[in-house]
Image (cartoon, rainbow, N blue to C red):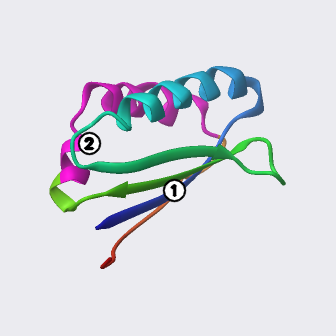
Amino acid sequence: MQIVYATLPIEPSHRDEALEATRVIAEKSRQEPGVIDYRANVDVEDANLLRFIEQYEDAAAVEAHLETEHYLQYEDTVIPDMLSGEPEIVQFETTG
């Protein structure tokens, strides 16, 4: 199983737009083959920080996710235009 944990600092002036785009990508991503779970949350201590917890069956499922239309759209709109800093992304493999 592959786990991806990401944090994205959102520019406050783009928060509502970023949250809607994040809701869409999470919903669509959960429907992908090989995705076990895909959750995006707002940090309880920082309302402008998004936290993603993604579980995939294997590395191929992660790669397939990165090529989906909804991911590429999110990457093209939210990532460059709505972040207030650098995202942090960690990916690791786990058993069981």
What secondary structure prevails in the magenta region?
Answer: helix
For the record, the magenta segment spans 61-83
Q: Give percent across and percent down for residue 89.
A: 46, 60
What's the amino acid at mark 1?
Ala
Could you tell me which residue is drawn at 54 percent across and 31 percent down? Answer: 22
Q: In which quarter of the image is residue 42?
A: top right
Rendered view: 87 above or below 16 = below
Q: Give percent across and percent down for residue 12.
A: 77, 32
Quadrant of the image containing the C terminus = bottom left
Could you tell me which residue is drawn at 74 percent across and 51 percent down? Answer: 43
Q: Which of 89 and 20 is in front in this view?
A: 20
Rendered view: 66 above or below 73 = below
Q: Give percent across and percent down for residue 74.
A: 42, 29
SS class of the residue under badge 1?
strand
What's the amino acid at mark 2?
His
Quadrant of the image containing the N terminus = bottom left
Judged left or right of residue 49, residue 2 is left
Q: Give percent across and percent down for residue 63.
A: 20, 50
Could you tell me which residue is drawn at 49 percent across and 36 percent down? Answer: 79
Q: Which of marks 2 and 1 is nearer the N terminus?
A: 1
Is residue 75 magenta-colored? Answer: yes
Please give the label number shown on residue 65.
2
Q: Disc 2 to disc 1, how far (Cα)?
A: 15 Å
Please give the label number shown on residue 77.
none
10 Å crowding of disc 2: few (<14), some (14-19), many (20+): some
Rendered view: 36 above or below 28 = below
SS class of the residue under badge 2?
helix
The residue to which callout 1 is attached is 6
